[in-house]
Image (tube, rainbow, N blue to C red):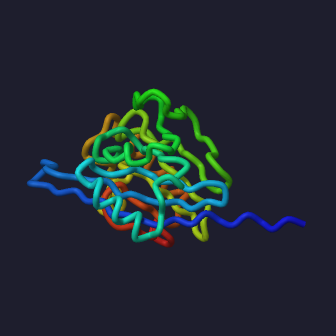
């Protein structure tokens, strides 16, 4: 009898942030998340282009070789979420086709299991092609980009201020929160939603 596959492990490589002046966003970089699955090493979002060298250092400190990363999933194609994609030259890139990603990107239009325990979930609203990554780890972890950009969006149950369609964005938030036990937001620390829904 073959051993059961191990559950994917989720680690935040670099915590994202948003810097505001009043209602205006003046700087931002996304959270970068590593999923170590039985069949693949996956990075979700790569941050702002100016973070390239810092991200390289972060990965080195985790003993992650960029050439060992099989997939880079972009929750959407805003530059603060895909700015360091070029660091992962050997990785397959994944995005929603509505995001008009570069040629050669594996595109999704519906929910899709990427590898066992890791599903790309369609969560539009912030942009037409926003996606999240649902990981069946020791807990159910949703890496959701700007579908839920910060813990404050969760606490106030408000979709992102920048939204292509606020109704869809709210529906996507609800979908994520219905499934997840832990949320890795697009910008800021991870948080538990167990008992807080």
Q: Please state which of residues 74 and 191 is positioned toward the viewer in this rendering.
A: 74
Task: State how many labels appear.
Answer: 0
Judge left or right: residue 113 versus residue 23: right
- The percent coordinates of residue 170 (x first, y second) are 40, 46
- The percent coordinates of residue 15 (x first, y second) are 33, 64
Residue 57 vs 18, above or below: the answer is below
* Res 155 seen here: no
Furthest-left residue in view? 21
Looking at the image, which residue is at 40% across and 33% down?
128
* Res 163 seen here: yes
Furthest-right residue in view? 1
Looking at the image, which residue is at 53% across and 55% down?
68
Q: Please state which of residues 194 and 188 is positioned toward the viewer in this rendering.
A: 188
Q: Please state which of residues 21 and 63 is positioned toward the viewer in this rendering.
A: 63
Residue 101, located in which quarter of the rendered image? top left
- The percent coordinates of residue 53 (x first, y second) are 28, 57
Looking at the image, which residue is at 41% across and 63% down?
59
Looking at the image, which residue is at 35% across and 49% down?
146
- The percent coordinates of residue 186 (x first, y second) are 35, 54
Judge left or right: residue 112 versus residue 194: right
Quadrant in the picture for the N terminus? bottom right
């Amino acid at each position: 009898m073959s051993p059961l596959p191990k559950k994917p492990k989720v680690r935040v490589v670099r915590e994202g942030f948003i810097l505001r002046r009043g209602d205006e966003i003046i700087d931002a970089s996304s959270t970068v998340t590593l999923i170590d699955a039985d069949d693949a090493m996956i990075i979700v979002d790569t941050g702002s282009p100016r973070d390239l060298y810092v991200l390289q250092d972060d990965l080195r400190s985790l003993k992650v070789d960029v050439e060992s990363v099989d997939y880079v999933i972009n929750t959407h194609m805003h530059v603060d979420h895909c700015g360091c994609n070029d660091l992962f030259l050997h990785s397959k890139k994944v995005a929603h086709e509505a995001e008009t990603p570069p040629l050669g990107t594996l595109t999704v239009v519906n929910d899709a299991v990427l590898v066992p325990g890791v599903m790309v979930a369609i969560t539009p609203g912030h942009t037409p092609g926003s996606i999240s990554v649902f990981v069946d780890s020791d807990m159910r972890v949703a890496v959701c980009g700007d579908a839920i950009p910060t813990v404050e969006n969760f606490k106030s149950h408000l979709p992102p201020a920048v939204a292509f369609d606020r109704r869809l964005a709210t529906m996507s938030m609800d979908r994520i929160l219905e499934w997840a036990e832990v949320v890795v937001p697009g910008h800021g620390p991870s948080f538990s939603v167990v008992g807080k829904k």
